[in-house]
Image: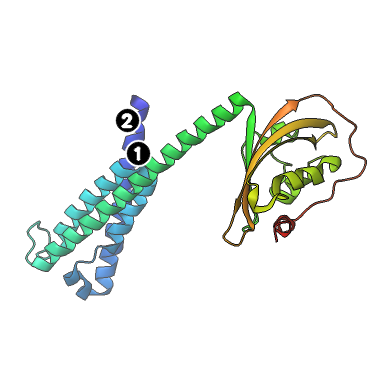
Amino acid sequence: MSAAIRRTGRHFLFAIIAVAIALAATEALYHADARLKSRGTMSFFLAAVVIAAWRGGVASALFATLFSVLIGAWMMPPDDSFRISDPNDVIRLLLFGFLASLISYQHFARQRTEKSLKESEGRLNFSLDSSGVACWDANVKAGTFWKSHNLPVIFGRTEADFATTYEGFFAYIHPEDREFFHLASVGGGADQRDYEISHRVVCGDGTIRRVSTRGRMYIDEEGRVERMVGAVFAVDNKLVGPAPSAAPPRMALGDIAAYLI
């Protein structure tokens, strides 16, 4: 509990410092051009709210908002008083409060979304680890390749040296199974969207492992492969054949679409 209180106190202190810096910057701006004081500018205080939200979260941002409104009201004519003589200044304060509250809410919503995504990712990783299944997603048009965290393990490799492209991923397939894998996954054209095959992969230490891949391809309006996804699990962790003597050739993503043209 004491640690949480200290953390909250640091966030509020950071908000106070941010508002104090905004106050100093505003006073310097008024000193440079006294005419700006009649306009009641609050831009620096709005920046302080953004910084407080980034550093301390929604509570710190709301605290910075309230603190800024009080200081802004004190600075507006007549000086050194919370009584505001110009109705336009009241409107400016209300507008500032609205914008600052909107920033605080947006930050809160972003934090909540990030937390939800992190929890969902944790559940997904647990499910994949428990089932021994790994996933990959190749966007043919964009040329991007995504993999789950455990795909390198199934392929007998480390995260650091695992390929980040489909071409590199395709190169891990045993040379004798590469054409079979390619034809099974995309050779059927637009009429074959799902596939399930058993094939061999070359591990990082040169050993051979048999895996099973269940995949799906997505076709665009022109009948070409737009995206491919797959789920992989190891059938046998033992050496199932000699390692290939030559390095397997790579196949570009564009070659996949060529099968469907």
Q: Which mark is residue 193?
A: none
Closer to the camera in the image, 79 or 218: 218
Relative image position of residue 97 (x, y in whole percent): 21, 55
Closer to the camera in the image, 74 or 205: 205
Residue located beneath label 1 in the image: 10
> Which image quadrant for residue 36?
bottom left
Q: Is residue 101 left or right of residue 184?
A: left
> Which image quadrant for residue 39?
bottom left
Whether 235 is drawn above or below 252: the answer is above
Q: Quadrant of the N terminus?
A: top left
**Disc 2 from disc 1: Cα separation:** 9 Å
Query: Mark 2 or mark 1: which comes first in sequence?
Result: 2
Q: Is residue 99 left or right of residue 220?
A: left
At a point 17% along the width and 60% down the height, the residue shown is 93
Relative image position of residue 58 (x, y in whole percent): 31, 44
At a point 64% along the width and 27% down the height, the residue shown is 132
Relative image position of residue 228 (x, y in whole percent): 63, 48
Q: Is residue 218 left or right of residue 83?
A: right
Whether 95 is drawn above or below 227: the answer is below
Whether 33 is drawn above or below 20: the answer is below
Residue located beneath label 2 in the image: 5
Q: Secondary structure at mark 2?
A: helix
CA neighbours of label 1 inside 10 A, class few (<14), some (14 to 19), many (20+): some
Q: Secondary structure at mark 1?
A: helix
